[in-house]
Image: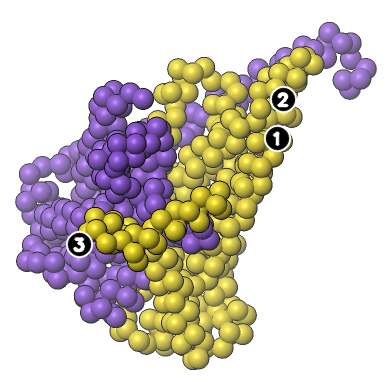
Amino acid sequence: MRQSAALSARRRGRQLWFGLNTRSVAEGAVQNLLLLASLVSIVTTVGIVAVLIFETVEFFQEVSILEFLTDRQWTPLFTQQHFGIAPLFTATVLIAVGAMTVALPIGLVTAIYLSEYAPDRLRSIVKPILEVLAGIPTIVYGYFALLFITPILRAIFPQMQTFNAASAAIVMGIMIVPYISSLSEEAMGAVPRSLREAAYALGSTKMEVATRVVVPAAASGIVAAFILGVSRAIGETMIVAIAAGQQARLSFNPLQGMETMTAYIVQVSLGDTPTGTIEFKTIFAVGMALFLMTFLLNMASRWLLRRFREVYQ
Amino acid sequence: MSATASPKRHALLRKRKDIAFQVVAVVATSIAIAMLVLLLVDVARRGFGGLDLSLFTNYPSRFPDQAGLKSALVGSVFVIGLTAAFALPLGVAAAVYLEEIAPNSWLKAIIQTNISNLAGVPSIVYGLLGLEVFVRAMQLDRSIITGALTLTLLILPIIIIATQEGLRAIPSSFREASYALGGTKLQTIGAVVLPMALPSMLTGTILALSRAIGETAPLITIGALTFIAFLPDGLRAPFTVLPIQIFNWISRPQAGFHERAAAGILVLLAVLLLMNAAAIILRNRYQRRAQW
């Protein structure tokens, strides 16, 4: 493989450096243009990281990292300013955990059903429906959370606030179900048939094959799907901005309103905070935290998936 | 318990458990589908009455029964059209480079890893990038072109990955046939590979654009406005889009605005449905024609 790479590199080099006919010069030029296009993605990443680091460094020149990490209040938009990310962080994690308690069981059992039980015709109907669920804009889920789920929950829990973490988490969970189910089903599909047949030959029922053979064998793929789901939940914006409210509050009560990191960025963006002020810089510091969290989760998920693929090839 | 039970009872128990699990599985699978149905029914029930002509011909208003989507619809068309014009050539070029030209080097590996990482970055982070680079550094203001550039970066990974899959599905014998006839690399790409990959390129682009149409957060972050009572007069004009208008209506306390929001969602979903139908039709048509 290395040899062919070197060969094609040499071929391209000849076209660029020694090619006298115009065609090979043009070939080289176009190929370099195509290379430039693919470098846009690198530039994008560098841009994101540079922008976040630049503004975050400026932010930490005015606010100490210690305050950012340990203060229990987040009130940059009030006269009495506090810059502790704790309330935003706990709200983000609490809602993500809530979303995953909805998404994981439903998504995983759906995947087991589609992979092990459902007849082909049913699967060919259910899978596109789940894809539709994945394609619905998050603004629509936000509408559903605030105007459909919240009134129902408030009828059950009268003390619940209009803006609350619970309905945002539930609807976000529904949104994440298709990601979990499709990735888990893919992982289960990669489990060799022979493993299932061995279990059936020993007299196992379908459920025993599914839960004791297929799920454990696909475990790292399922965990990868789960981590990816958590990453989605943390980065999801519109559902929480609409349904969970915009009050940064250090609380673990899902019936109360709370503000996630993403919802805070939306709140500041909707107001008219002058650029360059400390209030403006907060959204980049929060964005940096968000980026780091999702980046680490995505890396973990990809690492698991790669490991999983190696096992069954 | 199972140790003391007779083998026959034990087998019966296991069979019952199996059936119970199957019931649970059917229920779990139905929950997601039921939620989709509930969502659609609720939106239709609340929004259908608001689907009148004034929704399309009116600008936003303080009065719910006069509020319309005109500026948001036009804004969405401008932003998405421009996004398509930027993202399709860029995405296809990048995919062609990675699949057809790039030698297997560290550079290719880095670009490839980078693209899949970008696909996982939360959309609001792209908004922060657009705000700093396009709005502030490049002085493009909070304009249509800023919105389109931001969305282009957001959907580029999706288009690249979809096009790469399409390119990978073309058997190498087609390329070899072209080389055997004396075709150069670019001639092969232009005359053989790209035409064959066209359906996957187009479906990938349409699906990416339908993601872009529904995106709200990054556009709010770059400062798209929520109340625009005029049509854009150029690419540097301030703008609003469909989902931002819907967001604004959802955020208001009056029930009248919630009905408008539901009507707006119906419009948005109809547009998405049309785009997805177009993608499916394209895919099926070309798949039937190209048999290999």
Disc 2 residue type (three-letter): Leu
Residue A134 percent location from the top left of the image = 41, 42
Residue at 43%, 23% in the rendered image? A124
Residue bearing the label numbered 2? A195
Residue bearing the label numbered 1? A217
Residue A107 percent location from the top left of the image = 55, 37
- Distance Cα–Cα, label 2 vs label 1: 9 Å
Disc 1 residue type (three-letter): Ala
Q: How many marks?
A: 3
Chain B: what color?
purple
Residue at 76%, 14% in the rendered image? A201
Chain letter belonging to callout 1: A
Taking A83 as reference, is A96 above or below it?
above
Q: Nearer the viewer, residue A76 or B218?
A: B218
Depth check, mark 1 against mark 3: the one in front is 1
Tell me the SS state at disc 3.
Answer: loop
Residue lying furthest right in this view? B4
Residue A171 percent location from the top left of the image = 45, 47
Residue at 31%, 54% in the rendered image? B93
Tell me the SS state at disc 2.
Answer: helix
Q: Circles 3 and 2: CB distance less than 8 Å?
A: no
Chain letter belonging to callout 2: A
Q: Nearer the viewer, residue A85 or B61?
A: A85
Chain letter belonging to callout 3: B
Residue lying furthest top in this view? B8
* Chain in yellow on the image: A
Say whether residue B60 is visible.
yes
Taking B58 as reference, is B285 above or below it?
above
For the N terminus of chain B, the image quarter is top right
Disc on the earlier residue, 2 or 1: 2
Residue bearing the label numbered 3? B240
Residue at 83%, 11% in the rendered image? B9
